[in-house]
Image: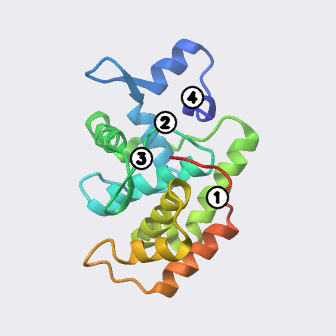
Amino acid sequence: IRADNLFLRQKTKKQIFKYLLFNNQKGGAILNPILLGGILKNFYDKFSMTLFDDRLKLQKIIYLMKIKRFNLGYSFSLYLYGPYSTELTKDGFQIFQITSFDKLNPVEPKDENLNATFQGFIKNLAISDRKNDVTWLEIASSYIYLKNNTNLDDNKIVELIMNKRDNFNIDIKEIENIIEKLKRDDYFKENAK
């Protein structure tokens, strides 16, 4: 499902196009940073691209949204801290070139059923403050990415996650608990690369 079909309540195609798309230097179109900021506003009252943890949260939240059927059009590859999109980082920085995060309003899906699903997704990430737990976000998104994009079994994926960084001190039980929660929350119904 495309972002323009999800999050806009504008009435004309011209208004939708102007709101959703933002021309980049190569002549293509990227997600409007104001729309991206409005989506993030559903999760965070304060956010800054100057903070590493906030940049990590941006990457993981948008990746998890993609898995849960809210694809904003970003492509992700696996990096040291999990799924990462260069385009998303650029768009994240553009938010702050245009406006202050404090001035943004939350943007929600226009369809009632999709909005209910989106609100459920937000509530799920609010459980135990997962949306602010960068370790949880990193493990969850890394596991999902590897599960959806490789033929590795769970044991090999856990091993890769545990050994991906020298300073990544995590207990195997914590990783296994996160994996079980992801399975209960149906993060594997859709394959998103």
Find numbered disc 4 in the image and state the secondary structure of the residue it sits on.
helix
Of the residues under marks 2 and 1, which one precedes in the sequence? 2
The residue shown at (30%, 24%) is 24
User: Mark 3: few, some, or many residues within 10 Å (few <14, many ≥20)?
Assistant: many
Of the residues under marks 1 and 4, which one precedes in the sequence? 4
User: Mark 4: few, some, or many residues within 10 Å (few <14, many ≥20)?
Assistant: some
The residue shown at (55%, 73%) is 154
The quarter of the picture where residue 159 lies is bottom left
Please, is residue 34 above or below residue 53 in the view? above
In three-dimensional space, the C-alpha distance between marks 1 and 3, rounded to whole angstroms, equals 17 Å
- Classify residue 108 as left or right of residue 25: right
Q: Amino acid under label 1? A: Phe
Q: Amino acid under label 2? A: Gly
Q: Which mark is residue 73?
A: 2
The quadrant of the rendering that contains the N terminus is top right
In three-dimensional space, the C-alpha distance between marks 2 and 1, rounded to whole angstroms, equals 19 Å
Q: What residue did someone put label 4 on?
A: 4
**In this rendering, does residue 142 appear at all?**
yes
Residues at circles 2 and 4 in contact by the CB criterion of under 8 Å: no
Q: What residue did someone put label 1 on?
A: 188
- Which numbered disc, 3 or 4, marks the residue closer to the eye? 3
Q: 60 or 110, which lies in front? A: 60
Please, is residue 111 above or below residue 48 in the view? above
Q: Amino acid under label 4? A: Asp
State the residue lying farthest toward the right: 113
Residue 147, x across and y down, in percent: 54, 61
Of the residues under marks 1 and 3, which one precedes in the sequence? 3
Residue 46, x across and y down, in percent: 38, 57
The residue shown at (70%, 43%) is 114
Q: Amino acid under label 3? A: Phe
Residues at circles 3 and 4 in contact by the CB criterion of under 8 Å: no
User: Mark 1: few, some, or many residues within 10 Å (few <14, many ≥20)?
Assistant: some
